[in-house]
Amino acid sequence: GQAMADMSRRHMQDMSSHFNMGLRVKDYGSHSLRRGGANAMKEAGWPPMRIQEHGRWTSDCYKRYLERSAVERMEVTRAM
């Protein structure tokens, strides 16, 4: 709930400060983190089952979060 959201925002602020990233934490929500995390795992080559487990998705709805990588988009473009 709200306590978890507040904790996540504090953690993001701490990480942003630590790595001198300059993020405006209020511009990001947990949805952004879940989507970004899932895509980062995909880009790093993690298998879909691990992405699903890590995000605690109980169905394959996590696939809606995944975007095509630049390489995947280029493959489609070349095939046209």
Image (cartoon, rainbow, N blue to C red):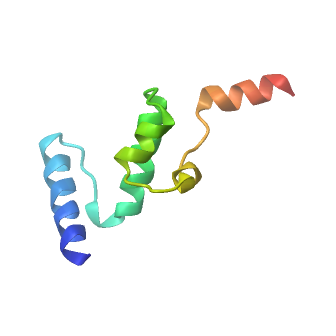
Q: Nearer the viewer, residue 69 or 66?
A: 66
Q: Look at the image and tell me whether residue 28 can be seen.
A: no
Q: Residue furthest bottom?
A: 2
Q: Residue furthest front?
A: 58
- Answer with left or right where residue 23 lies relative to residue 62: left
- Answer with left or right where residue 23 lies relative to residue 60: left
Residue 12 lies, in percent from the top left, at: 21, 54
Q: Nearer the viewer, residue 57 or 15?
A: 57
User: Above or below — where is 62 with respect to 10?
Assistant: above
- Answer with left or right where residue 28 lies relative to residue 66: left
User: Above or below — where is 74 with respect to 17?
Assistant: above
Question: At 45% across and 52% down in the image, what residue appears?
Answer: 35
| Residue 30 location, quadrant | bottom left
Q: Look at the image and tell me whether residue 11 can be seen.
A: yes
User: Above or below — where is 19 with respect to 43?
Assistant: below
Q: Quadrant of the N terminus?
A: bottom left
Q: Quadrant of the C terminus?
A: top right
Count of numbered marks: 0
Question: At 22% across and 61% down in the image, what residue appears?
Answer: 8
Q: Nearer the viewer, residue 16 or 47?
A: 47
Residue 31 lies, in percent from the top left, at: 41, 61
Residue 71 lies, in percent from the top left, at: 62, 25
Question: At 41% across and 57% down in the image, what residue appears?
Answer: 32
